[in-house]
């Protein structure tokens, strides 16, 4: 997954593993989220 950072934005690029993407997809389905939102939230929680 690649997120491009434009001037003034705060979202860094994330590189997620296949396992992280699968976990994010399950979270998105369970909680009615977008895949992007679930993946970003899950990755940030894991890295903090």
Image (cartoon, helix red, strand yellow):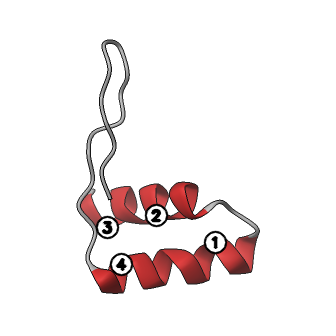
Indicate which disc, 2 or 1, sits on the residue closer to the N terminus.
Answer: 1
> In which quadrant will I find the N terminus?
bottom left
Residue 39's label in the rendered image is 2
Q: Secondary structure at mark 2?
A: helix
Is the residue under label 3 in contact with that under label 4 (CB below 8 Å)?
A: yes
Whole-Å distance between the Cαs marked 4 and 2? 7 Å
Residue at figure coordinates x 27%, y 54% from the top left:
14
Q: Secondary structure at mark 1?
A: helix
Mark 2 crowdedness (10 Å alpha carbons): few <14, some 14-19, many ≥20: many
Q: Secondary structure at mark 3?
A: helix
Q: Secondary structure at mark 4?
A: helix
Whole-Å distance between the Cαs marked 4 and 1? 12 Å
Is 31 on the left or on the right of 39, as rendered? right
Is the residue under label 2 in contact with that under label 4 (CB below 8 Å)?
A: yes
In the picture of the structure, the residue carrying the numbered disc 1 is 28
Whole-Å distance between the Cαs marked 2 and 1? 8 Å
Q: Position of residue 39 (x, y in %)?
A: 46, 63
Residue 20's label in the rendered image is 4
Position of residue 37 relative to residue 19, above or below, is above
Is 32 on the left or on the right of 6, as rendered? right
Residue at figure coordinates x 44%, y 65% from the top left:
42
Which circle, 4 or 3, is nearer the viewer? 4
Indicate which disc, 4 or 1, sits on the residue closer to the N terminus.
Answer: 4
Q: Position of residue 13 (x, y in %)?
A: 26, 45
Q: Position of residue 43 (x, y in %)?
A: 35, 63
Is 28 on the left or on the right of 24, as rendered? right
Mark 1 crowdedness (10 Å alpha carbons): few <14, some 14-19, many ≥20: some
Residue at figure coordinates x 55%, y 78% from the top left:
25
Residue 46's label in the rendered image is 3
Mark 3 crowdedness (10 Å alpha carbons): few <14, some 14-19, many ≥20: few
């Amino acid at each position: 997954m690649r997120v491009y950072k434009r001037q003034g934005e705060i979202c860094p690029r994330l590189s997620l593993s296949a396992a992280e993407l699968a976990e994010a997809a399950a979270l998105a389905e369970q909680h009615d989220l977008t895949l992007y939102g679930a993946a970003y939230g899950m990755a940030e929680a894991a890295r903090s």
